[in-house]
Image (cartoon, rainbow, N blue to C red):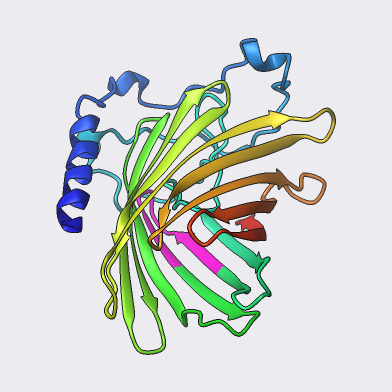
Amino acid sequence: MFIRVFLIAALAMVVGGFGLCPDPLTAAYAAPSSAPSLWDVAAPTSIQLSDEAYTKQLALCDFGCDWFAPYQPVYHTQGGTEMVRGFLGTPAFLSRSLILEADIGTEGGSNDWMSLTGEFAFTRRLQLNATLPMNLGDGEIPFGSVGGRALLFDTGDLLVSTDLDITFNSSTVDVTPTINAWYDIGEYFAVQTTIGGRFLEDYEDQFLWVGGVSRSFALGTTGRWDAILEGGYMDNNWVTSLGVVKPLEFLTPDLDVRTGVIWDWDDETLTVNIGLNYRF
């Protein structure tokens, strides 16, 4: 049943992408728009954006191109919306990042743990991932995971990718394939979703879905902030997260501090997530 749902979702994403073949003359990203916005009153648009160059779009009709082209970092869209990493879902975009984060529970600390994740995009479309967890309590955690991400297409406002992660436990190996999408809906808002599942050796396979919305905004002279709200179904439980991300511009714009809370509706538990994300 799960495999059928996963294949139908994948087919829907691919079919939805047909026709996303821009004119070659307009295939390069335009500069971020500086036109005044309705949101300028509530959240000024003086958001400091990273200085990376915009790259050529990868429409669905370009699927056979640029698999081994050099990696070019892009952290925001042509409209200036920042590509924000969520607290639950898997990003659709590629990066070269080190992420150190900790999950601190409010139920006695038995499941508290930290993790160090490395993401290394080595071509325009391909990336390797690895995660090393560290136990802070007496709960059972995985030994680690490895995987990869492939960017399927990037139209400037819409990115779709697929992930495959392999998690190593004490006596079993779990496989998690996902399809991830990220879409700039304008006014510095973006929506993102992850759909897939976990194939477990000792348990029944699990369906996975996460959806979220993020917004970049400026608070006075403090620079850019990013807020993200997510919800979904993970590990057979319904969960919701709310968090903020703040680039530490006074040190380097490539370093973000992240903090958020995750509420499990089935177990009625609250987890605090704190972390650092460094892009290199």
Residue extending furthest right?
A: 221
| Quadrant in which the C terminus appears | bottom right
Can you give x and y, in whole percent of width and height, for residue 243 in the image?
64, 46
263 above or below 200?
above
Q: Going by the image, does 121 lie left or right of 75? A: left
Compare residues 215 and 53 and report the one nearer the observer: 215
- State whether residue 202 is above or below residue 220: below
Q: Is residue 112 magenta?
A: no
The reply, left or right, for residue 225 in relation to residue 180 is: right
Say which residue appears at 17% left-offset and 41% top-offset: 11
Query: Can you give x and y, in whole percent of width and height, for residue 118 in the image?
Result: 52, 66
User: Is any part of residue 204 visible from this angle?
Assistant: yes
Q: Which region shows up in magenta?
A: 117-129
Compared across the picture, whether 35 is left or right of 143 comes to: right
Residue at 19% x, 49% y is 5
Residue at the far bottom in the pictured view: 171
Name the quadrant of the N terminus. bottom left
Instruction: Inspect the magenta stretch and tell me whether residue 128 lies in it.
Output: yes
Q: Count up the numbered dots.
A: 0
Q: In which quarter of the image is residue 223?
A: top right
Left or right, 255 with respect to 29, comes to right
Q: Can residue 64 be seen in this view?
A: no
Q: Residue at x 65, y 59 (%)?
A: 273
Name the spot of residue 203 as percent of width and height, x first: 29, 75
Residue 253 x %, y %: 71, 46
Camera-nearest residue between 258 and 204? 204
Does the magenta stretch mainly form a helix, a strand or a loop? Answer: strand
- Which residue is painted at 38% across and 38% down in the image? 159
